[in-house]
């Protein structure tokens, strides 16, 4: 008795048509997702007389040799945090304009940013515009 199959199962699989199917699915999802961008609400803003709260600005400069300057006055490294607290005492909406040299140590920059964070002051990092 010979029980062999007359129809043999192919052991290889041609994956070339799968590339076309995947490409069309990718194209479909890319096109439909780009049309599903939500639109933002357009709101007419109210006008007010007078000005808002005036922000108190302090300029801090860090040089390449990690020296601190507040408004052109050199401050010793160990006193920068106390001087920042002293200058901002009793003021609201304090903004610190931080100018640092490219070669300044990141620890010196982080010291000022950490103290500003504790005082809940905004920090603006001054940069040079690309040309």
Image (cartoon, rainbow, N blue to C red):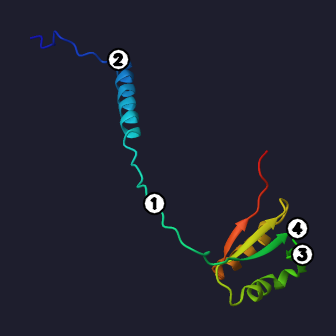
> How far separated are the C-alphas under marks 4 and 1?
45 Å
Asked which secondary structure carries label 1, the reply is loop
| In this view, the mark in front (4 or 1) | 1
**Mark 3: few, some, or many residues within 10 Å (few <14, many ≥20)?**
few
Farthest residue in the left direction? 1
Which residue is denoted by mark 2 in the rendering? 14
Disc assigned to residue 72: 3
Tell me the CA gap for discs 3 and 2. Answer: 75 Å
Tell me the quadrant of the picture where the C terminus can be found. top right
Determine which residue is flagged by label 4: 63
Q: Verify CB contact (< 8 Å) between mark 3 and mark 2.
A: no
What residue is at 39 percent from the left and 33 percent from the top?
Answer: 31
Q: Earlier in the sequence, mark 4 or mark 3?
A: 4
SS at mark 3 in the image: loop
Residues 122 and 18: in front is 122
- Density class for disc 1 (Cα within 10 Å; few <14, some 14-19, many ≥20) is few
Q: Earlier in the sequence, mark 3 or mark 2?
A: 2
Secondary element type, mark 2: loop
Alpha carbons under labels 4 and 3: distance apart: 12 Å
């Amino acid at each position: 008795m010979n029980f062999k199959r007359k129809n043999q199962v192919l052991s290889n699989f041609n994956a070339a048509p799968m590339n076309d199917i995947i490409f069309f699915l990718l194209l479909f999802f890319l096109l439909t997702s780009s049309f599903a961008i939500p639109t933002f609400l357009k709101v007419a803003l109210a006008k007010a007389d007078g000005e808002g709260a005036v922000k108190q600005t302090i300029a801090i400069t860090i040089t390449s040799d990690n020296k601190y300057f507040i408004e052109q006055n050199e401050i010793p490294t160990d006193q920068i945090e106390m001087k920042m607290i002293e200058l901002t005492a009793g003021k609201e909406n304090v903004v610190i304009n931080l100018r640092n040299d490219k070669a300044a140590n990141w620890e010196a920059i982080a010291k000022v940013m950490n103290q500003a964070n504790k005082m809940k002051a905004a920090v603006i990092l001054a940069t040079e515009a690309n040309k």
